[in-house]
Image (cartoon, rainbow, N blue to C red):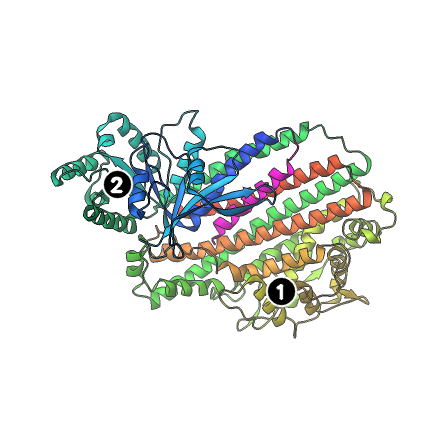
Amino acid sequence: MTTETDTINRLERALVNLLFSLSGTPNYNKLKNQILTTNRKLRITRELANTKYIAVAGTQSAGKSRLIREIYNLDSEWLLENEGRSEQLPLFILENKTCTEPYAVKVELDEKEGIEKERKIASEELQEILRNYKADNTILLVKLYVPIKHFKGEELGFVLLPGYELETRVNEKWQELMRHTLTHALGCILVTDETRLAANSSRKILNDLRSKYLEYRHPIIAVTKTENLTDEQRQELKKTAVEVFQCSGQQVTNIVLTGACDDEYKSKWEQALIFAVYNNTLSSRESENAKYSELDEILSNEIDFIIDQIEDDLLSMGLKSTVGKDKTVEEILLKFDEAKAKFKKSYSRKLVTQTQSYVNAAIQSAENSYKNNEEGLGNWLKNTTNTLIQNSDSGRHKERIRQFWLDNHNPDGSQPRTIIESNLLALSYLSKEQLKLDVAINYERNGNMVINTQKILGDISHDKITLLEKPEVKDGLNLLFRPDLVKEKDEIKFDENSDFPKAIALVPAIVMEYARIMQIATIATPSINIEKGMSESQLIENIAKSTSEGLPEFKESFIPIMRTMATIFAVDIVADAEIDTIPALISVLSGNSASTTGAVGIGGTVSMVAAGVIIAGYLAYQIGKETENYHNSQKEYIAAVLGHYGDANVQTSLEHYDDVMENIREVIRNNLDKAYGLNKDLLKKDTIYRCLNVVKNSQENLQRLLSGKQSRLA
């Protein structure tokens, strides 16, 4: 799965959780319609990104359903043939190697469990769903599986679209969804017939469709209902199609005349159509950019509308004003929210800059290697990347590029040579800035081995660490993370000018310092067994095993911050004023520590962030489609692959950060609730607010990813 689809899926889940949190609020039904409408578009976007689909588009009654019926020998049980308006939802048609007879499924949001489920449906229910678009419907999409016939098990299928109409207030919602699907499909078969080619009114609609959605593509033109024409009439009709669609040169072969009831004729046009699909289904820079721009509009308009509406509702919900302890809790949570947002902004900036530097070095090394060793690469790229037919050598080339992601062979030994080293530098800059650690931000090596790990660990200046050691701050942190240790809860005061808010503001930095220490442990290990295809749990197990021997002990100067970590993480990593070795931390990371008493969930949460930042670099290169169909040169191909890995690294790291901080916030809120007994209005309001923040984070992460992709297309 690609980073793009992962990130879209996170936003879908965030919107569903937000919807559930809104239950019982005044504008619930209105917001439900909007959230489901947006989620349906996101789910379709994800489907089209995961699988290569060819859109079957055209005006009403042009013969779209008839074409699909002929291609797969389907009867009217599955696809009706009506003159007039029929489908109002896209139908995804996919060949399945285990399928012996056609069957349909619906992908629907389970409102009780908050997850999507795929369930088989009868043909009657399929027809009912296709013909009745409802904004508040929990159905996200429908599929029709058919036996293998044309694509031999490849991830390639058709998506049958509703008829293209000029938009009106009546058809606006389902036409909008149809246009969204058309924009994100890999290619398009534009279906028409003799009557529509001749009629001025139909030409107007066809021209609107072509100019808005097919300008940068090479659609296949399927002219239906030609089975009863003579050869001469077919030739004349093809000339008309060439004129109407302004085809020239090679594009003329994209016009395929089709028909029914004649097996010999069908065999000829069917072969021509599938050949055209294989040879003309491609993306251009412009069409890819159109996809990202359209998705960005959804994020900027529809998601922003949902956020604005809910924020307005929160102000007018009539919840009781918070006073006393409730007010203190709100202020504490707000301070933490501000701190995690501020840290993420700095983290994102450093991570993007550092990752891009690493990617640039990897690109340079890869290009030099290919220049010296792969004379045939240029021809391979030229012949394969613009079609769906891939050369058998492609896997070897991709694997070699992946190796430059794992080790960029930077000739400057002071700079990162692995993505873990790169990510460590990004966090080290923040440790220097946020916690005032005196850390090294370059590397010293003996061969490839990093030998200055103690300098990277650094020394701590006393101003911020002594703050964490103050009794009132320790009591405050205990209230947040170890409420069982706090006896006088009523005496905890939140004063913006006191030290307690300053300590809360440091929590994200301290959590990520734990992750940084884990990264140092990893680069200090001579060899870690990393194999392609390893799961996250396997990677963590191997990392824990490899780093459990021979690692240096921490300096005495780390006692204060490690004590603070022990408080926050609820793990006993400090004993008798001495710092345990890194293997003790690794045991927590791998889930083998017996010392996980205290605040429920914190040990696992911090283990998650440590695991996340360590394995991000190892996992990123395993995911996603490595190239886009429009790259047609060695330089573009290498840059695209490594740029994709860079995106994956940034996205994975920031999403892990979001997950961890949300978990920590939840623990803080639960502990405050146990300590103070918060009123239901505040809990309801905070639940909505928290879910809204997750949506904002997911929106921001996806916008960042799209921005990176668009910048590389420029």
Name the residue: 53% across, 51% down.
651
Image mark for residue 173: none
Element on which disc 1 rests = helix
- Which kind of residue does numbered mark 2 sit on? Ala
Residue 219 as seen in the image, left or right of residue 435: left
Q: Earlier in the sequence, mark 2 or mark 1?
A: 2
Please name whichever residue, 124 or 131, is drawn nearer the observer in this view of the structure: 124
Determine the residue positioned at 43% across, 55% down: 625
Q: In this figure, which residue is indicated by the disc labeled 2?
A: 222
The amino acid type, in three-letter code, at marker 1 is Ile
Q: Is residue 356 visible?
A: no
* Residue at x-position 62% and y-position 71%: 545
Q: Position of residue 547 (x, y in %)?
A: 63, 70
The residue singled out by tag 1 in the image is: 520
- State the residue in front, 327 or 556: 327
Is residue 154 visible from the viewing direction of this image? yes
Residue 712 place in picture, x, y as percent? 42, 48
Q: Main secondary structure of the magenta part?
A: helix
* 303 relative to 435, above or below: above
**Which one is in front in this view, the residue at disc 2 or the one at disc 1?**
2
Q: Does residue 648 appear left or right of residue 481 in this picture? A: left
Q: Are marks 2 and 1 in contact (CB under 8 Å)?
A: no
Q: Nearer the viewer, residue 369 or 72?
A: 72
Percent across and percent down for residue 676 are: 81, 42
Q: Which residues are magenta?
A: 1-25
